[in-house]
Structure formats: C-alpha cells, structure tokens
Image (cartoon, coloured by chain):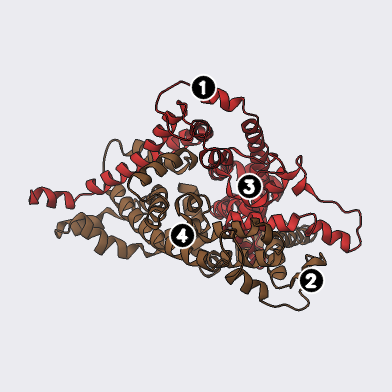
Amino acid sequence: MTVVAQTSIFLPRAARVGLYVFLTVSAIFFLLPLLVVVMNSLKPMAEIRQGNLLALPVSPNLDSWVAAWKTACTGLECAGVRPGLWNSIKITVPAVVISTLAGALNGYALAQWKSRHANVIMLLVTVGLFIPYQAMLYPTVKILSNVGLFRTYVGIVAVHVIFGLPYTTLLFRNFYVGVPEEISRAARMEGASFLRTFWSIILPISTNILVVVAILQFTGIWNDYLLGLIFAGNDNLPMTVQLTNIANNARGAANPNINMAAALITAIPTLLVYFLSGRYFVRGIAAGAVKG
Amino acid sequence: MTTWFNRQASRPDITVAIFFAIVALFFYGSIAWTFYMSLTRSTLLPNYQIIGFDQYVKLFTNHRWLISCLNMVIFGVLYILGTLAFGMLLAVFCDRHIKAESLFRTIFLYPLAVSLIVTGLSWRWLLDPVNGLQALMRSSGWESFTFDWLTRPDRAIYTIVIAGIWHSAGLVMVIVLAGLRGIDTDLWKAIRMEGIPVWRAYAQIIFPGMRPVIASCVVLLMSEVIRGYDLIIAMTKGGPGISTEMPAKFAVDFYFARVNLGLASAASIMMLVLSLLLLTPYFISEFRRRT
C-alpha cells in the first residue's frame, strides 16, 4: 500500500488520464476483431450485405453457427467444422497427455543426470526449440512413410509429441532442478527405482507445473495448422485446416457470417482454457519464455 | 542380467538416452538429411547423387525467394519493433498501479490463445475493402475513406504486421511486466529521492537493467518471424501476386505443391542458418551468464 502512495506521486492527474485513455484505446484495438467476428456471425446475409461491420445485429440468430457446424463446405465435403472438432480433440488430447508426461519424465531424468557434458547437451536441446519445422519436414515424412504412419492418426499424434518434446522437457527440467535433491535421495535409500520415484514421489508434487505445461501444449497443438495439414491425412484433418478450407472455398467466400461462426467455433476451446486458467497460462508463458 | 536391469532402473540414464536418441534422430538427423537433399538434383523423387551447391545458386537467383526474403526482413523489423514498443508500453502502464489491471491484462493477452489462422482470418475480414473497415467508414458518411492495403501489392505486407502485433504484444507485455514486478522497491525509492521523472527512470535505469528479459522477447519474436507461415496463409496466401510471400511458405510450397525437393531443402537450410545466426549472440551471452 505504501508503495502505491509513493510511486503514484510521480504521475500528475493529466498523465493519469492519458494513461487510461491509452489503455482503453489499446483494449478496443485488441477486442475489435473478436467483436466484429462475434457480431457478424449472428447476422443473416441480408444484414451483412449492407456493409456495416460494426452495426449490432438487428435480428440476431444462430443460423450461421448451425451452418458452420453442420453444412459449410470445405471443397471436399459439406459437413461444416463438426468432423474437424472431433479430429482436433482426438489428436490434441493424447498428444498433450503423452508429451506432457514424457516431458516430465525426461525433465526429471535430466535434472538427476550428472555429466560433464550436460551443458553442451542442454544447449543442443535448447537449439532444438528454434529449428524451423521446414528443416525437419521432409525427413520426418520419409521416416513415417517407412513405418506406414504418414498421414495417419497415430502419425500426427506422434509428430506432435516428438516435435513438442524438447520444449516440455526443458520446462520440466528447469522446474526439477529447483526441487531439493533430498526428496529423490530419500526415495532411493528406501530402495525405490528411478521410475518408481518419479511416478510415486515426484509426479504428485508437480501438479502446478503439469497444469502449466499441459495448457501450453494444448494451446499449441490445438492451434497448429502446418503439421496437421501435412501429417494428419484427409480423414483426420484438424479444425484449423478445415476452417481454412471453408474460408478459402469459393462458395464460402460468399458467406462471411458462416466463416466467422466457423472461426469462433474453432477458437472457443483455447479461449475457454485461457479464461478459465488465466494465471496458469500467464505463468506458463513467463516460465517458457524467460528460461526456455 | 536382472541386477544390471535393476541397477539401470534406479538411474536416469536409460530415460536420458532414449530422449537424446529421439532428439538426435528427428531433429539433428533430419537437419543432416535435409542438408544432404539440398546438395542433390532431387525434384519429385529424391536423387542421392551430390552435385554441390547448385540448388543454393538457383535459390538465390529465384525471384520469388528473393521477394520472400525481402518480405521477411520488412515484416520482421516492423513486427519486432512494433510488438516490443507496444508490449513494453502496455507493461509500463500496467505497472503504474492502475485500476482494473487484471481486466486490462486479460484483454491484452487473449490473442495469444487464438490460433494464427483465426487471427489472420479475422483481420482479413476486418480489413477487407469491400466488407470491412473501409466499407464501414464510407457507409457512415466518410465517402473518400480508403484503406485497401490488404489488396495492394505494395501495402499488403503491412496488414500482416498489424495482425502480428495484435497477436504478440500481450506476450511481450506479460514477460516485461514479470520483469518489472521483480524490480527492487529500494531502486524505486532511490529514483524518487533523486527526483528523476518516471519516463526517464524507465528509459535510462529500469529497461537497461532488464536487457536479458528484453533479449529473450526478441529471440521469441525472431523465431516467430522465421517460422511465419499460418498468418500468411490465413490473410493473403502470399498475395496479391507474390507480394507477401515468405521463406517458410516458399519451402512448404516447393516441398509439397511444386515438388522440387532439392530447392525446398536448400530454402529450409537457409532458414535454419538464419535462425542460428540470429540466435548465436543470445546463446553466447546466456551461456556466459549462467557459468
């Protein structure tokens, strides 16, 4: 409280007003696209044609949402984003669970692992975070084709897990390096194996970081476009790809309200996670950014 | 045999080894393979005979590639500077003990939860000259209002900058704000005693002391620039013409649509080299800081 009193002395009234004006204008800038998309997704085509993007819908209805959900055309078929939603769920859920748990195990192992070369190897893993996917795409396609997994369901989940592994591993390693060594040592003295210690002792004390990493992975994998496009195959295309196909379809271009509804349906899951888990989300970004 | 296994099970080595095998194969193995392909004449089918650096020569005489690189530089500079400036400004303002701080923060950060595909589509609709902002202004009486950058070859790239800043400013804000919150209250007391104006305190004392935090923001944004693919696909598909093409899209197009493996591999390797060049100073300073 005293801090508030001390530092706010610096700002005269005029500056404070200016500050709120700037923040409010910025907030409008950030909200504008969302508002426009929400409002126009509720309008019938007749209102859209009047060209007033920011007009409130006169007779709001959910027709475009229903069309986006069930009948919008991707160019291949006219089943809306519904199949994409199911594909995205069945890709994202296992990929998040596996890459998070595997990252935890690897991160714990790396934190425990004492070697002279640990630093160099950590550097190689960290550089791995910044390798453009393009430099790995073709060989990954080849490897997966050779084992019959290219453009299959298992293939796309595996790609998400593998490409996410350095990231989740580093996040967990940075966390476990700070966990007191005594905990692992005590478990070892009791005769617990490495895996046993990890599963029964370490995982239960990691709930916070598990949630943080799972949220980051969920957002990343749900929002992915490129990997889904290349590795998922036509039967498993995620929502982002279906949405793009709907929006770029010639017939679709004539129905912006349906496209906007489809975009919203695609964005809702990650937005929900963001609004429900705000603090974890923020913590994850800060941790991932500053240390990664 | 069982004792050997038991001993291993009590140590992290096996897990570490499996993890490194995956990283080595899929990350570094793939890079080596891609580099190898870039030295061959491969087009639709891989050709394993090395011909040297011809693909790189072809790449750098390819008009579309040069445009892509130029676009990446224009986009990268404006996007990074814009996002940094905007994000840092928001962080400073949020740090000034404002009311409803968490509401503002929530609004500034939510774009980060939205995919780049949805971001790009939303801005495409908003800036569309026929249905978007321009039509709105004209229909509300401002007949001569013109904002058709999205469809102008010489301006479309700037609309992508706007969408990019919209998506990432919150990220910089959160990271910088976390840094600002970590600053010693004694420092602020000293600044107050010296009577230094707030803006000068930030510009000359606070931010210079946060250089590592700002550097990691720059690194994150740079890697977004080099990878930039989704946003282009959603907003302009590289158009009008080839005016918003980028290297990431060039490589994917040449891998899968135009099936020219050798050239696509050369482009990918150039993207990698650029990432590493830009990252090296950061890694060196981080490494020094930690040891």
Callouts 4 and 2 close, C-beta under 8 Å = no
Distance, label 4 to label 3, CA atoms, is 25 Å
Residue plotted at (61% across, 44% down): B207
* Residue B291 shows in the view: no
Amino acid type for the residue under numbered disc 1: Asp
Return the mark for residue B232. Answer: 3
* Residue A104 shows in the view: yes
Q: Residues within 10 Å of mark 4 (few under 14, many from 20)?
A: few
Residue placed under numbered mark 2 in the picture: A47
Q: Name the residue nearer the viewer: A265 or A281.
A: A265
Q: Chain of mark 1?
A: B
Q: Which chain is red?
A: B
Amino acid type for the residue under numbered disc 4: Asp
Residue placed under numbered mark 1 in the picture: B54
Distance, label 4 to label 2, CA atoms, is 36 Å
Amino acid type for the residue under numbered disc 3: Ile
| Chain A drawn colour | brown
The reply to the same-chain question for discs 1 and 3 is yes
Return the mark for residue A235. Answer: 4
Distance, label 1 to label 3, CA atoms, is 29 Å
The reply to the same-chain question for discs 4 and 3 is no
Q: State the image coordinates of residue A74 (x, y, percent, origin top left).
A: 59, 60
Q: Is residue B57 above or below residue A167?
A: above
Q: Secondary structure at mark 2?
A: helix
Q: Nearer the viewer, mark 1 or mark 4?
A: 4
